[in-house]
Amino acid sequence: MSAVANPATVAECLRVGAGFSQGDRNWIAEQFATLDARLASFHADATELEVSVKDREARGQKVTLECWIAGRQKIVTTSAEEDLHAALNDVRDDLRRRLNDAKTRQEPRHNKHLREEGHSVTAAPSDDDAEAPAQTGVA
């Protein structure tokens, strides 16, 4: 695996959206710092993260973390935890899991489990899927 010249980091790629102020940004970036190791395999100029909160500190608050990486589908994670700190940890951990899952699906040759059991319907697309252009309008 070749090293990325300008690896993505939370500090470089994070934007704060609705419900957060720029003053919250450093605090949130510290919470999300454990994502740096996972983001390092992507280019910083092709990676964006945005965190937002709806109804902050109210019953039913919802924290959303969106991740855009060039050449991949957007990943959106949400949490309805009532404690803001817990909600941020929840979306962070979910994003890490989903990035790991996406990497495993994209590179099954590095996954011993998938190599030994062969291709399953849920693990990898069929050859027909790879040859046909996508016909869906998924954003």
Image (cartoon, rainbow, N blue to C red):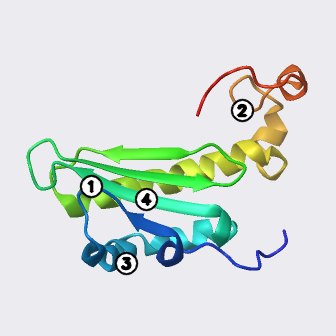
Earlier sequence position, callout 3 versus callout 4 = 3
Q: Are marks 3 and 4 in contact (CB under 8 Å)?
A: no
Q: Residue at x 34, y 59 (%)?
A: 17
Which kind of residue does numbered mark 3 sit on?
Glu
Q: Circle 2: is it few (<14), some (14-19), or many (20+) Cα within 10 Å? A: few
Q: Circle 4: is it few (<14), some (14-19), or many (20+) Cα within 10 Å? A: some
Q: Secondary structure at mark 2?
A: loop
Q: Which residue bears the numbered disc 2? A: 123
Image quadrant of residue 29? bottom left
Q: Residue at x 85, y 48 (%)?
A: 109
Q: Circle 1: is it few (<14), some (14-19), or many (20+) Cα within 10 Å? A: many
Closer mark to the observer between disc 3 and disc 4: 4
Q: Which residue bears the numbered disc 4? A: 50
Q: Which residue bears the numbered disc 3? A: 30
Gap in angstroms between the C-alphas marked 1 and 3: 14 Å
Which kind of residue does numbered mark 2 sit on?
Ala
- Where residue 94 sits: x, y (%)? 44, 50
Task: Please determine whether, in this image, residue 98 is positioned above or below residue 2.
Answer: above
Count the numbered circles shown. 4
Q: Which residue bears the numbered disc 1? A: 87
Which kind of residue does numbered mark 1 sit on?
Ala
Position of 112 compared to 12: left or right?
Answer: right
Q: Secondary structure at mark 4?
A: strand
Which kind of residue does numbered mark 4 sit on?
Glu
Q: Secondary structure at mark 3?
A: helix
Earlier sequence position, callout 4 versus callout 2 = 4
